[in-house]
Image (cartoon, rainbow, N blue to C red):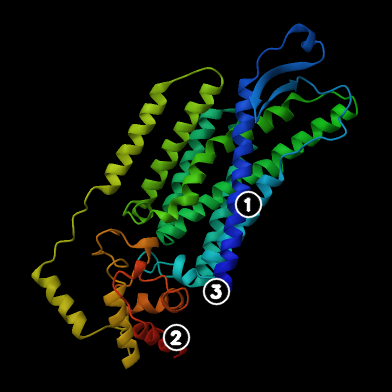
Amino acid sequence: MPWLDWLSLFVRWFHVIAGVAWIGASFYFIWLDNSLETPPEWKKKQGIKGDLWAVHGGGFYEVAKYAYGPQTMPKTLHWFKWEAYSTWLSGIALLIIVYYFAAAAYLIDPAVKSMSEAEAILRGIALIAGGAIIYETACRTKLGNYPKVFAIALVVMLVVVSYLATHWFSGRGAYIHVGALIGTIMVANVWLNIMPAQRKMVNAVANQQPIDPAWGAGAKLRSVHNNYLTLPILFIMISNHYPMTYQHPQNWLVLVALMAVAAWIRHFFNLRHVGKVKPSILISGAIGMLAIALWVSWPRTAPVVTAHSESNAAAETTEPTNAQPQPVTELDKQVMALVETHCQGCHASRPTDDIFRVAPLGVKFDNWEQVTRQAPQIIHRTTVTRDMPFLNKSNMTDEERAVIASWAQQ
């Protein structure tokens, strides 16, 4: 469906633009808040709590933060909310377009768990909504008053969610659902906490009423949470390009490890903004990333094939079971032969290609069931966009593409 590809392109493009704006603003304001310096006395008398000078784009800027608020509310007050809302809305739209419209191809992996498309979609929604509700509920309890304990509880929740997702969905689909949960938590922090607190502060200043310190403290806490979640979610946004992570046998642990190291590295920069430079954090983070890379790349032992298993494999070859459908028509057999010739070099449990050592995007064509499940993608990529096989390394001819086109009509 070419229109779906174009829709996916435009929504993904917008999602990246919105995400850059949101995370860029988040990074900037965390840096800004941590970089404010004590102002001179004459500025303090004006109600200024901290200020800083900066140079950028050929000009000088002075930024000031008020302890309470200005004497009169400015005519134009800039709010930062639509960056978050548009990122989440476009991300959810992309989740639906890519993973829910094509759940059989990208979300469901029978080798992980067999289920219907409807069940997979419902599980995905429940994972995102359930995790966000648990987080928000925890924040509203006394647990939110103990940042370190809360951080441990949040890590435990993400570990459980990562484990469940990778045992329900394909590796690629699992990672993106964990990312969708984190994104939902982050945008909920903006929508349910940061923005309401800021509205209360603005109304209080406008009406010359006292500001409750709890408003700012609560908003700042959620903002800090979002700040530490930015690098983990950025990794997840690009993770579908790196199947060696989400196709690893312990893919849930790979994800947890990468998120933990990313948050730890973010901690270095947060400390640096307040003048605390700790190279040990950056060095240990780099060592952690290297350790993960070596672990994931370490050659895994192939399963031992015994004489008994070989005889069973032979029996399965000659007497196919109902659990693994076989090509029926002559055209089916031709297509399977083409897949074996042109596709299985990369898209297999054990690729033989000299570059792709892991099946790209987790897509495998080891048997006819997998081929039929991915039929729309095979047809589209070989007969419409014609970008597969990759760089046409296997020299698929126009006549062979015509066979697949005929199969599509059938």
Q: Nearer the viewer, mark 3 or mark 2?
A: 3
Q: Position of residue 84 (x, y in %)?
A: 66, 46
Q: Which is more toward the observer, 250 or 10?
A: 10
Query: Which numbered disc flags the more N-terminal residue, 3 or 2?
Result: 3
Q: Could you say which disc has been placed on residue 372 in the image?
A: none
Query: Which numbered disc flags the more N-terminal residue, 2 or 1?
Result: 1
Q: Is residue 102 left or right of residue 243?
A: right
Asked whether residue 161 appears in the rendered view, the answer is: no
Q: CA distance from mark 2 to mark 1?
A: 36 Å
Identity, as a three-letter code, of the amino acid under mark 3: Pro
Q: Which is more toward the observer, 308 or 239?
A: 239
Query: Which numbered disc flags the more N-terminal residue, 1 or 3?
Result: 3
Tell me the SS state at disc 2.
helix
> Which residue is identified by label 1?
88
Quadrant location of the N terminus in the rendered image? bottom right
Residue at 78% across / 12% down in the picture?
A: 43
Q: CA distance from mark 1 to mark 3?
A: 25 Å
| Figure quadrant of residue 304 | bottom left
Q: Which is more toward the observer, 207 or 84?
A: 84
Is residue 7 placed above or below 218 in the rendered structure? below
Residue at 36% across / 28% down in the picture?
A: 284
> Which residue is identified by label 3?
2
Identity, as a three-letter code, of the amino acid under mark 1: Trp
Tell me the SS state at disc 1.
helix
| Figure quadrant of residue 111 | bottom left
Identity, as a three-letter code, of the amino acid under mark 2: Ala
Q: Dot 2, crowdedness within 10 Å: few (<14), some or many (≥20)?
A: some
> Which residue is identified by label 2?
408
Q: Nearer the viewer, mark 1 or mark 3?
A: 3
